[in-house]
């Protein structure tokens, strides 16, 4: 993410595109979400399946209070 968007990118956690209960999700429209995913997938550095898997694993191993985030993907 940092390589594609920069280290201070607002939506670097990808909750914007995968977590409909997050503030990040509600702050963006569908076109912005599609644009983020498109840029990531066009980089050919990761597939959609790998992206979803890494997102889920990240939130499964984070603090208990955010484990539910992975369940929504």
Image: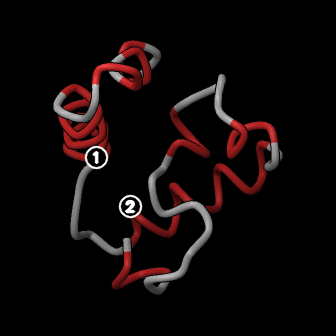
Q: How many numbered discs? A: 2
Residue 3: x and y in percent read: 34, 85
User: Residue at 65% across / 33% down in the picture?
Assistant: 22
- Please tell me how crowded label 2 is: few (under 14), some (14-19), or many (20+) other residues with Cα within 10 Å: some
- Please tell me how crowded label 1 is: few (under 14), some (14-19), or many (20+) other residues with Cα within 10 Å: some
Mark 1 vs 2: CB contact within 8 A: yes
User: Depth check: 15 or 67 in front?
Assistant: 67
Residue 2: x and y in percent read: 37, 79
Q: Quadrant of residue 20?
A: top right
Q: Is residue 67 left or right of residue 38?
A: left
**Numbered badge on residue 41:** 2
User: Depth check: 73 or 37 in front?
Assistant: 73
User: Residue at 62% across / 68% down in the picture?
Assistant: 10
User: Residue at 20% across / 43% down in the picture?
Assistant: 54
**Numbered badge on residue 51:** 1
Residue 61 vertical position relative to residue 7 in the rendered view, above or below: above
Residue 39: x and y in percent read: 50, 69
């Amino acid at each position: 993410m940092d390589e594609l968007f920069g280290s201070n990118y607002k939506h670097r956690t990808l909750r914007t595109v995968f977590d409909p209960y997050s503030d990040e999700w509600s702050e963006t429209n569908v076109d912005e979400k599609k644009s983020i995913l498109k840029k990531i997938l066009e980089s050919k550095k990761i597939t959609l399946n790998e992206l979803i898997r890494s997102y889920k694993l990240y939130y499964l191993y984070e603090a208990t209070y955010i484990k539910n985030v992975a369940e929504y993907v």
